[in-house]
Amino acid sequence: MSLTAKPRKERKENAERRRRQLLDAARRSILRYGLARTTLATVAEEAGLSQGVAVFYFNSKGGLLIETLRDLYQGYERHWMTALEGAGADPVAQLEAVIRADFEPEACGPETRPLWFAFWGELHFQAQYDAVAEDFDLRRHEALVAIWRALLPEDEQHEADQFAEWTETLTDGYWQRLHLMPAHAERKAARDATLRALARLRPDILASLAG
């Protein structure tokens, strides 16, 4: 048993390392060539591997790009969930933590933001991209709804979904501004403006976010 367990473990670790190498290379390829001109060949070149290795792990360009999008969402979800968990039980602190996380480099920095918009531009044309996005976006929305339910008084609980949607619209809008006008927009300013907007939306419960 012990003689075969180590090689099997090593094979698994090597496979995971190679897969990670190709996913990272796919991101670099998209940043360099764009989504349409990224191929298994450009990804293999970025990774310093043969195209056959890329085919072995992902079968096709489509499969590789779907997994690249899923990996992007998984990283983003880990990022904002870690921020949420670190905020404790106070819903105001939770909301602030999630917003702040949204404007950190891991979420929308210059090496990440172009990837989001490359994939989002194809959502309505690629059903598989849309399915990946919908799955993660739903969990994100549900987390925001839960925060707003904890914030709102009993007689306004039915508004939690709407407030969550407004929160998402603010962050999405500033992400778009950062993407389209990088010379005239800055992440910290966008973050602070989002927090101030939420504070003005509900000064009775979010005045502390105004800074």
Image: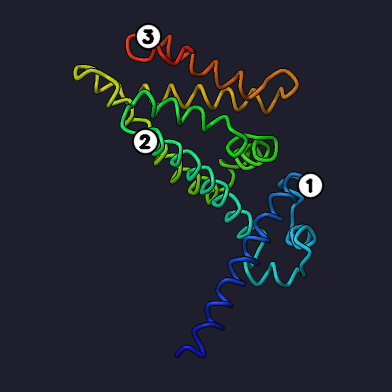
Say above or below: 129 vs 87: below
Say above or below: 61 vs 201: below
The answer for how far apart the CA atoms under marks 1 and 2 are is 35 Å
Which is more foreground, mark 2 or mark 3? 3
- Identify the secondary structure beneath mark 2: helix
**Number of labelled discs?**
3
Question: Label for residue 203?
Answer: 3
Q: According to the image, label 1 marks what residue? A: 33
| Residues at marks 1 and 2 touching, judged by CB atoms closer than 8 Å | no
Say above or below: 137 vs 183: below
Number of residues whose C-alpha sits closer than 10 Å to that of mark 2, classed few (under 14), some (14–19) or many (20 or more): some
Nearer-the-camera pick, 37 or 96 = 96
- Identify the secondary structure beneath mark 3: helix
Q: According to the image, label 2 marks what residue? A: 143
Number of residues whose C-alpha sits closer than 10 Å to that of mark 1, classed few (under 14), some (14–19) or many (20 or more): few
Whole-percent x, y for residue 85 in the image:
39, 39
Say above or below: 24 vs 153: below
Under mark 2, the amino acid is Ala
Residue at 23%, 17% in the rendered image: 153
Question: Label for residue 53?
Answer: none
Nearer-the-camera pick, 45 or 16 = 16
